[in-house]
Amino acid sequence: MRANAISAIIFSNSNDEALKELTENRSMSSVPFGCRYRLIDFTLSNLVNAGISNVGVITNENYRSLMDHIGSGIYWDLDRKNGGLNIIPPFMMGENKYSGLTETCFRAYQFASSLNSEHIIVSESGIIANIDITALINKHIEKNADITFVYRKAECPDKFKNTLKFDIIDEQIRSTSKAHRLTESGNYSMGLAVFKKSAFIDLINLSKNDKDEDVFAKLISENISNYKMFGFEHRGFVAPMDSKKSFYENHMRLFDENVRNDLFNKERPILTKTRDDMPTRYGIHSDVKDSLVADGCIIEGTVKNCILFRGVRVSKGAVVENSILMQGVGICENAKAKYLIADKNSVITGKSPANGTVHKAFVVKKNQVF
């Protein structure tokens, strides 16, 4: 197959509502994860590991952080004269706001129509997994499918809207329904699929003038008989970021070596923006146990069972346990924190308790002094 036969579209703001505390000033795709990554790193890496070099990223709002992170796409080898990484910003309409679903669909249609590709991979934001896209494409072509959805066998996702549940017989999707009960197990969409270009454009055309937020899921359900739809099961580690609870729990799952080995597969590496920094410095009174620590940190206090991003500072006498501290977070002298999610550049002064529980983490917002 020729190199440009497959392209990709990423919807960077899909599922923003699921993590309101962390997407107030950024898109879902630029939410940090695992000491040094953003959610979009996993999608981009999955694509380029399969040799896909033409990727469009559709942005709606709060995309400054995303653009700063992905830039020209150089860290994923997507800075190219032909194809490469394409940022597709919203049109400015009315009071400088994008016009919603219709306009988003129109931009997807424009980009897809301009591609000299036979197939288009479409991905939402908010799922972390190391997916073998090459095997997905091979299955799609082998079955001569119009659409092939990546799915996982699991319980219903927490807060992702419009998640599709598939009834699958002999790999072919026979019917779909929307997820609605948290205890209901089944074959759930992972928000990633490969389409024949013609099928994608047809469905986008049908959705452009529909104001229903569920329109795409609705159209898939209504057109089961019109298209050949197949499922591709992903059996590896999956971390859906569909709530504050899942964001916290999926970080804690990184302490499992088997999870790390599956997610950060050497054969399909996860790439991210490179930032050179000094090694982490540990003070003579520091006490660090069972933690994942990025470079550039300064630790003089106690850190137990924590995820520390780049440039975190834990001052003398401070104690932090079971917490996630994002880039540039400062823990002041003698401050105490448990079950904390501290967003980028926030400061924990210790004047008030910064404690959550194992069931409900306490969140301090970006740049907030608490």
Image (tube, helix red, strand yellow):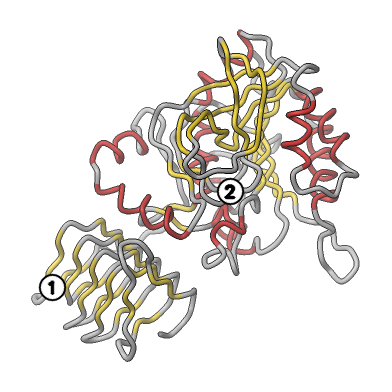
Q: Based on the displayed image, in which of its 4 quarters is residue 202 positioned?
A: top right
* Viewer-nearest residue: 207 or 2: 207
In the drawing, does residue 105 fall left or right of residue 10? right
Q: Which mark is residue 124?
A: none
SS label for mark 2 = loop
Give the residue type that dot 1 points to: Ser
Q: Based on the displayed image, in which of its 4 quarters is residue 292 positioned?
A: bottom left
Q: In this figure, which residue is indicated by the disc labeled 1?
A: 286
Residue at left offset 71%, top offset 23%: 119
| 118 up-or-down from 319: above or below | above
Q: Give the distance between the C-alpha atoms of the residues marked 1 and 2, in whole angstroms.
A: 40 Å
Give the residue type that dot 2 points to: Phe
Question: For the C terminus, which image quadrant?
Answer: bottom left
Q: State the image coordinates of residue 134 (x, y, percent, origin top left).
A: 52, 21
Q: In this figure, which residue is indicated by the disc labeled 2?
A: 160
Q: State the image coordinates of residue 98 (x, y, percent, origin top left).
A: 81, 60
1 vs 2, front mark: 2
Dot 1, crowdedness within 10 Å: few (<14), some or many (≥20)? some
Residue at left offset 66%, top offset 34%: 122
Residue farthest toward the bottom in the current orientation of the protein:
351
